[in-house]
Amino acid sequence: MNCATPEGTYQFAKHFCDYKDFYIKSNDLLFSKLGIGTFNKEPYKEENYVFHYIEGIKQAVRSGINLIDTASNYRYGESEKEIGTALQELFASDEITRENVIVCSKGGFIQLSYPFPKNPYEWINENIINAKLALAEEIELDQHCMTPDFLVVFL
């Protein structure tokens, strides 16, 4: 399975049974009250791309955190790639399974890629509007689009 499951999250939490009251249950999934996120409030700063979250994600999971928050636009997609790398390493070493962890993402954000396009407006025009994934007026604040065609391509 490619998602968290009730049994998988239960097994994960059981491994950390010394952490009294650290896990809560919702929709049959057990997850840590503390999660780890990958948002950086200044995405245009070049220095935000020289550090990585891979070891931090792995250490958080090894410490009992099974709730990871991200979005495709965080650090221009680098956050989700690094979460994927960290989780793959944890899977490969048999420390966890995919069913143990909850990964929360968000849809609708316009994900530019790193390195940054010289003109983001041209990129949006070329890759979204000219590609007929959305009309200009369906794009909010040059960063968010919820049209079905856009979501199919960018999720």
Image (tube, rainbow, N blue to C red):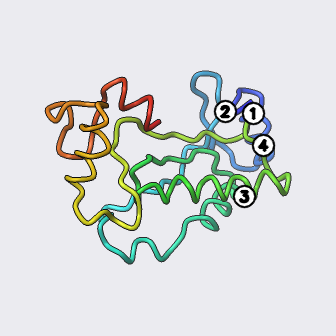
Which residue, as the protein is rendered here, is positioned at the far left?
137
Q: Nearer the viewer, residue 127 or 151?
A: 127
Which numbered circle lies on residue 149? none
Task: Decide which of tag 2 and tag 1 comes sooner along the chain.
Answer: 2
Q: Nearer the viewer, residue 5 or 74?
A: 74
Which numbered circle lies on residue 10? 1
Which image quarter holds the N terminus?
top right
* Secondary element at tag 4: loop
Which numbered circle lies on residue 3? 2
Given the image, on which type of amino acid does mark 2 rest?
Cys
Residue at 55% in and 44% down:
33
* Secondary element at tag 3: helix
Give the label, 2 or 1, closer to the camera.
2
The answer to whether the residue labelled 3 contacts the one labelled 4, judged by CB atoms less than 8 Å apart, is no
The answer to whether the residue labelled 4 contacts the one labelled 1, judged by CB atoms less than 8 Å apart, is no
* Secondary element at tag 2: loop
Given the image, on which type of amino acid does mark 1 rest?
Tyr
Task: Give percent across and percent down for residue 116.
Answer: 33, 65
Q: Is residue 87 left or right of residue 69?
A: right
The answer to whether the residue labelled 2 contacts the one labelled 3, judged by CB atoms less than 8 Å apart, is no
Q: Nearer the viewer, residue 46 or 123?
A: 123
Q: Residues within 10 Å of mark 1 (few under 14, many from 20)?
A: some
Task: Decide which of tag 2 and tag 3 comes sooner along the chain.
Answer: 2
Q: CA distance from mark 3 to mark 4?
A: 12 Å
Residue at 31% in and 72% down:
45
Disc 4 target residue = 97
Please tell me whether residue 26 is drawn above or below residue 91 in the rendered image: above
Q: CA distance from mark 3 to mark 1?
A: 15 Å
The answer to whether the residue labelled 2 contacts the one labelled 1, judged by CB atoms less than 8 Å apart, is no
Give the label, 4 or 1, closer to the camera.
4
